[in-house]
Image (cartoon, rainbow, N blue to C red):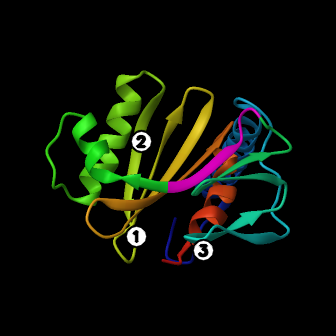
Amino acid sequence: MNASGPRCGDGYWAARITLRAMRHLVLAALLMAAGCANGPAAPLIESSEVVCTDAFCLSVPQGWDVEKGEGYLAFRHDDAPDQAQATISPINMQAMVENAGDAWPAETADVVRAFWQLLEDADVARFEHLERLTGGAFRSEGKFESGKMWHLIIPGIGSDALAVEVRGPNASWVIHADVFFDDVVILE
């Protein structure tokens, strides 16, 4: 390239076109892999509804059937009822940490690691990523035996916490996990 800009003979345009084509090819391959990895791709979210118990509320994307239990909510998605599942319930962080062989008290990040350690010890999941959110909650994700799993722990008082778990057949379901995680409200 010279001071007046790129010229046809210096390979600039050929490299630029090849790079652009490669980006499109990689993007198409990633989208196909996400959609076909272990099940159906997540449907786009057009609406959501708020579902509550006496203790908490959260937003739920359309297409999820809800089961209300004593102190918890469980969900299955119509498009992948055996693979796309979610739950929200209170948990005891001390019990989780101690069951993983660690000592209490522990930081919330250590509780998240204990949660994943228990799953890894049972050979049903593998931890991939941990992120601290505003307000002290922690979001994590990993591979589950039949796809992807996202987990949110919102610490409460002492060892009390609220946990939200979302599973999907592949990474495309993260958009649904985002909706479940974004609007959790603790009422008590």
Residue at 28% of width from left, 59% of height from top?
Answer: 159
Mark 2 secondary-structure assignment: strand
Q: How dense is the environment of label 3, judged by Cα within 10 Å: few (below 14), some, or many (20 and up)? A: few
The residue sitting at the front extreme is 70
Q: Which residue is mark 1?
A: 133
Disc number placed over residue 15 in the picture, else none: none
Q: Is residue 92 above or below residue 33?
A: below
Q: How dense is the environment of label 2, judged by Cα within 10 Å: few (below 14), some, or many (20 and up)? A: few
The amino acid type of the residue labelled 1 equals: Leu
Q: Which residue is mark 3?
A: 183
Most common secondary structure along the magenta stretch: strand
Q: Is residue 186 above or below residue 78?
A: below
Asked if the magenta segment contains residue 85, the reply would be yes
Q: Is residue 6 above or below residue 134?
A: above
Name the spot of residue 41 as percent of width and height, x first.
78, 43
Name the spot of residue 142 as percent of width and height, x first.
48, 40
Quarter location, residue 145: top right
Task: Give the spatial CA distance, label 1 vs label 2.
Answer: 17 Å
Of mark 1 and mark 2, the one earlier in the sequence is 2
Quarter location, residue 46: bottom right
Q: Which residue is mark 2?
A: 128
Mark 1 secondary-structure assignment: loop
For the record, the magenta segment spans: 82-89
Asked if the magenta segment contains residue 71, the reply would be no
